[in-house]
């Protein structure tokens, strides 16, 4: 369960959110500039809000009143970016293992074979990211984040760079991750169709404010 | 084919060039990264100072080296007294002169390569549990590699051509400080030295061409390794 109460201001933009996300997949809907990517960056620890607190499964990741700030590499929140952000100098295999190797063996919940099988990555393992298609890159990025055994998976418009056909191919993988690995996810998008497909729990952002919530 | 003094000038140039390259390696990476990524007090002044050897007549840094690292200079005396190291009139001084003149090239190459790194790659690594040091070692440094390689080759090539600072600081001593350009200079001032000058000039041309060719090939290879696709290939 993720409890979020944050206030973040930069130049003219202000993000103010107070909500609880406790669904297996929480959809966050919003147009560009609504602050949804900023919200994910704050949850991941890549941005520091001026005020607020973040609790993940009862563990404080941020509390400005008590000066608590857990740095991104200690948060165990996997983040999948819009364009994958695979490390270009590493093979797909080593990209997949990047986060996996950063956690102690006893905390690794999934093995590489299972994730590779589920996301159908076997034929790509020895290739470099530069030679992959957009859809393949996103599947690798997803696998890499899952292998990191995150407590929460943050997905920042993971399909926005893909065409409709590829979107339809990849969307079911998110449901597989949900049912097989049971990692809670926050899925940010501007596409209501993607949210509809994945979850019935969602919230909507506009100009940095929560404007609508499913319940 | 080459006479003994010509071989001497050639091997000394290579020796000085390699040492100058080695000297520039770590400070070049540090300064290039710092300038690309960090904001600090008086950064524009620091940068201007660092790049000054590129625009100054080389005799100016040469003279400044002489008055600081020379036998009467403060640093020169201190080094001689504490470590028994002397720079004046020997090959170590030629290395120092070459390194100072060529250092901006290393810094510039590294700085540009760091500026081209997508910060989100480093952020992605940090959200995958990599500490800032690990991010630097496993993401930033490998992605800087093409810039580092090009910088090193530029330093080496520039060192081969260094003349003004070297002759001002360490003189023109055969076998000790007479590198290729100084040997060419000496040959052109000798009666009947034209043949030697021409041979040394041909060697210099070949050296410069192959160094730049190597730089080009290495950067292509590094780009391929990084998965960068050039237009038209």
Image (cartoon, grey):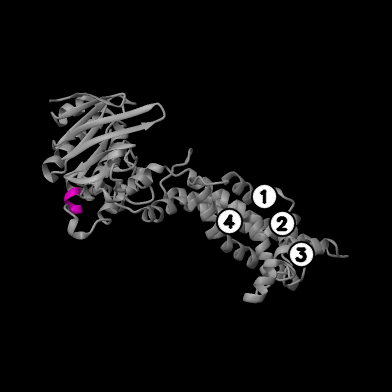
Q: How many angstroms separate mark 4 from mark 3 (CA)?
A: 22 Å
- Mark nearest the camera among 3 and 2 is 2
Find disc 1 in the rendering and name its residue.
B52
* Visible residue check, residue B163: no
Who comes first in sequence, dot 2 or dot 4? 2
Residue at horizontal 47%, vertical 51%? B144
Q: Is residue A213 above or below residue B14?
A: above
Find disc 2 in the rendering and name its residue.
B61
Find disc 4 in the rendering and name its residue.
B153
What subunit carries mark 2? B
Q: Are marks 3 and 2 on the same chain?
A: yes
Q: Does the magenta segment cover residue A1?
A: no
What subunit carries mark 4? B
Q: Residues within 10 Å of mark 3 (few under 14, many from 20)?
A: many
Q: Are marks 3 and 1 on the same chain?
A: yes
- Magenta-highlighted residues: A111-115
Side of B171 relative to A207 (left or right) = right
* Visible residue check, residue B32: yes
Query: Whole-percent x and y of residue A111?
Result: 18, 54
Residue at horizontal 22%, vertical 31%? A18
Residue at horizontal 53%, vertical 45%? B112
What subunit carries mark 1? B
Q: How many angstroms separate mark 4 from mark 1 (CA)?
A: 20 Å
Q: Residues within 10 Å of mark 2 (few under 14, many from 20)?
A: many
- Mark nearest the camera among 4 and 1 is 1
User: Helix, strand or loop at disc 4?
Assistant: helix
Q: Nearer the viewer, residue B204 or A28?
A: A28
């Amino acid at each position: 369960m993720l409890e979020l109460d944050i206030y973040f201001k930069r130049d003219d933009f202000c993000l103010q959110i107070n909500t609880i996300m406790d669904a297996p997949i929480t959809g966050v809907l919003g147009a560009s500039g609504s602050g949804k990517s900023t919200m994910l960056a704050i949850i991941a620890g890549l941005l520091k809000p001026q005020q607020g607190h973040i609790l993940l499964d009862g563990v404080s990741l941020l509390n400005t009143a008590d000066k608590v700030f857990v740095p991104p590499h200690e948060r165990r929140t996997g983040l999948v970016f819009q364009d994958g952000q695979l490390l270009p100098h590493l093979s797909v295999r080593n990209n997949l293992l990047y986060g996996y190797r950063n956690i102690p063996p006893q905390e690794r919940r999934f093995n590489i074979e299972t994730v590779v099988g589920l996301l159908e990555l076997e034929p790509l393992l020895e290739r470099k990211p530069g030679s992959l298609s957009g859809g393949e890159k996103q599947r690798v990025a997803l696998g890499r984040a899952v292998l990191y055994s995150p407590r929460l998976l943050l997905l920042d418009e993971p399909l926005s760079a893909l065409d409709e056909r590829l979107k339809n191919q990849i969307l079911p993988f998110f449901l597989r991750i949900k049912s097989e690995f049971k990692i809670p996810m926050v899925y940010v998008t501007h596409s209501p169709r993607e949210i509809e497909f994945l979850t019935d729990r969602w919230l909507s952002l506009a100009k940095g404010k929560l404007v609508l919530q499913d319940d | 084919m080459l006479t003994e003094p010509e071989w001497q000038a050639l091997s000394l140039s290579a020796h000085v060039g390699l040492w100058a390259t080695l000297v520039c390696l770590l400070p070049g990476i540090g300064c290039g990264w710092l300038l690309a990524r960090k904001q600090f007090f008086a950064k524009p002044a620091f940068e201007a100072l660092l790049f000054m050897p590129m625009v100054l007549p080389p005799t100016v840094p040469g003279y400044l080296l002489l008055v600081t690292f020379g036998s009467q200079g403060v640093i020169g005396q201190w080094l001689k007294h504490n470590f028994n190291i002397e720079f004046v009139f020997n090959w170590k001084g030629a290395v120092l002169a070459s390194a100072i003149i060529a250092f901006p090239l290393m810094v510039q190459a590294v700085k540009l390569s760091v500026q081209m790194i997508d910060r989100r790659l480093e952020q992605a690594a940090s959200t995958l549990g990599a500490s800032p040091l690990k991010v630097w070692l496993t993401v930033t440094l490998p992605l800087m590699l093409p810039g580092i390689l090009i910088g090193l080759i530029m330093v080496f090539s520039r060192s081969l051509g260094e003349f003004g600072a070297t002759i001002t600081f360490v003189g023109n001593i055969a076998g000790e400080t007479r590198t290729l350009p100084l040997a060419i200079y000496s040959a052109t001032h000798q009666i009947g030295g034209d043949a030697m000058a021409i041979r040394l000039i041909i060697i210099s041309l070949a050296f410069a061409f192959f160094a730049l060719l190597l730089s080009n090939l290495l950067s292509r290879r590094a780009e391929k390794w990084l998965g960068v696709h050039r237009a038209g290939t």
